[in-house]
Amino acid sequence: METYLVLFTFLGAVIALLFAGFTAKRVLKFSEGTEKMQKISKSIRQGANAYLKRQYSVVAIFFAGMFVVLCVMAAFDLLTWFVPFAFVTGGFFSGLSGFIGMKIATLSNARTANACREGLNRGLRVAFSAGSVMGFTVVGLGLLDISVWFFILKFIFKLDPSTITTTMLTFGMGASSMALFARVGGGIFTKAADVGADLVGKVEAGIPEDDPRNPAVIADNVGDNVGDVAGMGADLYESYVGSVISASALGVSAFGGDIKAMAVPMLLAAVGIIMSIIGTFFVRTGESIDQKALLKALRRGTNLSAVVIAIIALPVVWFVLGKESLGLYGAIIAGLLAGVLIGFSTEYFTSDTYKPTKKLAATSETGSATIIIGGIGLGMKSTAVPIVIVAISVLCAFFLSGGGAATESGLYGIALAAVGMLSTLGITLATDAYGPVADNAGGIAEMSGLPAEVRERTDALDSLGNTTAATGKGFAIGSAALTALALIASYIEKVKTVNPDASFDDFSLMNPVVLIGMFVGGCLPFLFAALTMESVGRAAQSIVIEVRRQFKEITGLMDGKADPDYASCVDLCTKSSLREMVLPTIVAVVTPIAAGLILGYQGVVGLLAGATVTGFLIAVFMSNSGGAWDNAKKYIEGGAHGGKGSEQHKAAVVGDTVGDPFKDTSGPAINILIKLLSMVSIVFAALVVKFHIF
Amino acid sequence: METYLVLFTFLGAVIALLFAGFTAKRVLKFSEGTEKMQKISKSIRQGANAYLKRQYSVVAIFFAGMFVVLCVMAAFDLLTWFVPFAFVTGGFFSGLSGFIGMKIATLSNARTANACREGLNRGLRVAFSAGSVMGFTVVGLGLLDISVWFFILKFIFKLDPSTITTTMLTFGMGASSMALFARVGGGIFTKAADVGADLVGKVEAGIPEDDPRNPAVIADNVGDNVGDVAGMGADLYESYVGSVISASALGVSAFGGDIKAMAVPMLLAAVGIIMSIIGTFFVRTGESIDQKALLKALRRGTNLSAVVIAIIALPVVWFVLGKESLGLYGAIIAGLLAGVLIGFSTEYFTSDTYKPTKKLAATSETGSATIIIGGIGLGMKSTAVPIVIVAISVLCAFFLSGGGAATESGLYGIALAAVGMLSTLGITLATDAYGPVADNAGGIAEMSGLPAEVRERTDALDSLGNTTAATGKGFAIGSAALTALALIASYIEKVKTVNPDASFDDFSLMNPVVLIGMFVGGCLPFLFAALTMESVGRAAQSIVIEVRRQFKEITGLMDGKADPDYASCVDLCTKSSLREMVLPTIVAVVTPIAAGLILGYQGVVGLLAGATVTGFLIAVFMSNSGGAWDNAKKYIEGGAHGGKGSEQHKAAVVGDTVGDPFKDTSGPAINILIKLLSMVSIVFAALVVKFHIF
């Protein structure tokens, strides 16, 4: 039976990739529009490609260094020889996911703008199709990587299940490292360009957003692609792969090495892909620019996929593991439901159709200080709901899958909940990745002077993209928390293979080493958020200076008689974001190893738990504050509280500017951080168990 | 010997109170100055008294309710009958500490202003003496409460040591509840008045701070007293008492019920009082308005006290517990040192003589958004240093006191570290409480039209007060973290007395109930910060509307021909802060009980640990961000980056306004929160052990 299970997983991966390929071909058949549109799109594409090429060359140095370190460890028998290679593969595929997503996004922006000239539904279809290419590339590559490695380790090298899973967790570490570079680097790029362009263009010079006279406008559009597309692609590749392999690893210990328990998460992922593909065919809308109708169009696809997966998971679990394991089905449903509910909660706190964001917009009446206080309060308060949702789903997953009798089964259940939550990733990612495409399309429409109705349509699509992005973020955070818990459990399993005396009781909160680990771990997300925010600040400042210089030195620029030097801004963003992304990533990789060498494996577990808790809280807080500020500004621009140009609007712009690095740089990077910490700990477990001070 | 130990503690308390009394008498001999100054001081005093009276009547309802609940629990044998009374005593003394401190502060503000007419040193002596009255009242009442209860329980009712300590922990809960009300209510009052006065006065009407035409100016000065004095007094009473009794409780379990181990923390506290009194005599300065010289004057007193305590603690431990327990001396020193180092770190991050705040001031060049991002980044980054300091001191305290062999001894060591840190409280609190007095003196000097040189002197004192306040906050947070850890250990001891099967191993991080408790607990400080910030926002908004109304409706107000209606603003602040303080306190009391009834005692320990970690982080983050914004603004007002009135200054004012509730409402309240959660859990432990779902 094992062979068939692997084959089915492999098949799921191939179907996803084929679907992505066909969809890409269909998108590329659309016209890119006028010559001007083509020219602008090409500049964006070139900037994005140039950035990515340089990013990969920096990342390559890191990977080469880590490869050597891992080889040395393998030479000292602290790892198997598969590990260095698995690490590099994970990084490669994660980067490839981002690259393909960005490629198609930059090829679709002008096409979406052009399709919007003909109608809203046509625009939606092009943008959503581009998003689908990205979504299914990510899940397809993820599952391909998993199934091929599994096949090699199991059927060629005939390793035992436990060695297979710990080796596979290593490519999780590769994927996470790559994802962190992509998220942090891309996040700094996009927000430095955005903040820099706004501060000088909108605030100082008083020209509208996406105005072609602004030298940072192309950099801003490039940023959407390298941050929100390439960064997100690498990020979710990592989430997806991480959740599946950590569940497989825990399945091995829960079912005493039974390969079938290992296969269940992979099968679920494969089933999820097929159901997500079906869901995409149900996304279509009419011609009215009505946010609710548009949102309904997208939701129809995702909800349908979720329902069908919920139904089909039952026979899958029953068939593979037997009737007595049906509690695990409960765990999967707990995860799926939690994902949906966290999405709702995010929408409630960040969409201007609900009270919190409306109230936030009202605080602009007393100036920028009160809207900042209000937004921070809103974000902090909003953490309570997803915390309770995650808590309940963890409890359900644990106890439904038999954790009361055997802790290992319960932990496997928690990991399966994460897989359940991410099983619809193909389509949810499509609805998420379509946002930046629509955003770019709007920029192109503005810059190439298309009629106002086109811009209205792209704006409608873009605004919807903000809502789906917020939902997507809630989803990413929720799955990160569950996956991180599963990875902590996997870490302990790994420690046990090296030190059989280790037990669950080592990790008592009354062990001061565990407590101190928790304090240090809890601090990491704060430190990480601070580092990334400061990076954005520094990078934005350099853009501000450059834009001011161009406004002053290029004669005729403001009258539209001379072109600004777009490339210099793109180059500046590239350089500063690549310089700034190194330190945070090094902190993430080095801290758990250093903590382990000082505090031992007990301290590492404390560190991971502390980082997961505060990481989840900070990520939710920052994403929701940022989303709410963004939408409060949009709400005011829609005419409330004085509308565009009023003092209230200026206050809201301050809020939005603060929110930019919150929601698009620091917040999302923390999701990756908490998983990368665990992955690094797992890979270096043997070292830490053998050498430590306390 | 026991009798002598108690006697010595009692003596320490009496000496502190006598010293406070004499100092108060000396302060009151100074003149209050001109008739106008007397009138203003009287208005402030009346407003503060009126507020406190109404606050106590609201708090009385809560205490009456809790008293009934505790009596019912005693009737069902879930508590001893001492508990309800101990609870009320703790609340009473905590409130009394705040009341006396506020009384003397409001009697000294005009006296300080008047003394500043004669010279800087004279002004410093008056303000610092007022602070000393407060400092020694707090420690005196705290130690009195402890020694009298100990005497009653031990020598009259002849209870066993374990019952004595758990009963005494109950008055900790009373003190914490009172402190939370005082901190939250006072914090909302002071910041609502401050923000409201600034937003309309400074920003909209363009009149200077403390201008008598501003209707909210008296409320602002009242706020300094009810928030920064009465609130802080109740707060530190609670910290002090909490640290001593939790150490006593852990001493009982570490030394098998030996009463001497219980007495050591009390003795240390008594020794600390005497050394602190000696330290106060070394606080004096010259006549140059030089911040460094002034700071040195204050530091001379605190450092001297710390050094002498460090020396004398050695014979105390040796004499009482014998040579074999000298490791505990190491724990005390670890705590003392950690307190000093955290103070330095706070100063580094928030004083404008160092790089971080200078760099923050520079971000004002690109507007309010960048200074907000910069300040949040600074605060988040600054958490790393105190976390490492606390981690190292916990490790040292634990292992030096023999925690490697017996966990209980190590936990006792951690608790003693907290006592060591707080042993200098008498004098550190004096340097802290002097700040609001100087602030008020400045307001009175401005309002009564004293010559510019007087205002210069009060400004110098006030500015120094900002630095000592920041140091004091770092100190309060550090001791709160250590005390909270000790209280968690005390909770587990208490659980063991009800359920002897409970063990340290119940609290493994791999127990999902513990993990979920951590998530929920971790969320509480976020929720709490959000609730208190929103309260400030709402209350400030109502002040803004009232001040605007007065500016519009009272003719001749802006020309100085008519007086504003100060009382209506004071009344508005009083009403809204009392209304707003209830919900956060209820959340703090109800959550640990509810969590316990659902998740059991294992979940409660997770909750307490999670709340301690994120509470510490959020408190440091918010205090340091707020302090840095405040001083960045002052730095710009001193002439840097365009100086007063420039665009940069406006940006810095936005930062300062956001920082106000950060550093004076939410941040400090969280210190109390994390201890109150543990105290409540301890009192309700028997209930939770008997009834819970999971």
Image: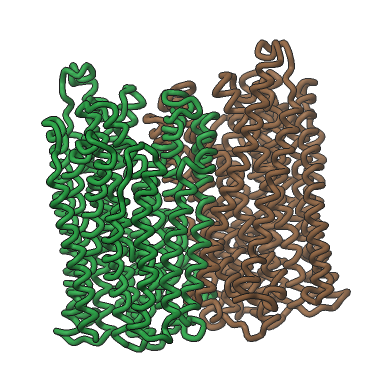
Chain colours: A green, B brown
At a point 28% along the width and 79% down the height, the residue shown is A165
Task: Give the quarter of the figure containing the N terminus of chain B.
Answer: bottom right
Q: Nearer the viewer, residue B574 or B348?
A: B574
Disc count in the image?
0
Quadrant placement of the C terminus of chain B: bottom right
Residue A92: x and y, percent? Answer: 17, 62
- Whether residue A458 is visible: yes
Percent across and percent down for residue B322 are: 65, 79
**Is residue B251 placed above or below A339 in the rendered structure?**
below
Residue closer to the observer: A200 or B1: A200
- Determine which quarter of the picture holds residue B513: bottom right
Residue closest to the eye, A413 or B217: A413
Residue A607 in view of the camera: no
Q: Looking at the image, which residue is at 34% across and 54% down?
A: A669
B101 with respect to B545 (left or right): right
Q: Is residue B324 left or right of residue A550?
A: right
- Residue B478, how many percent across, how many down? 56, 57
Q: Is residue B666 left or right of residue A454?
A: right
Q: Position of residue B389 (x, y in %)?
A: 48, 60
In the displayed structure, would residue A325 be above or below residue B601?
below
Q: Residue at x 82, y 78 (%)?
A: B159
Decide: is A144 above or below A216: below
Q: Residue furthest right?
A: B156
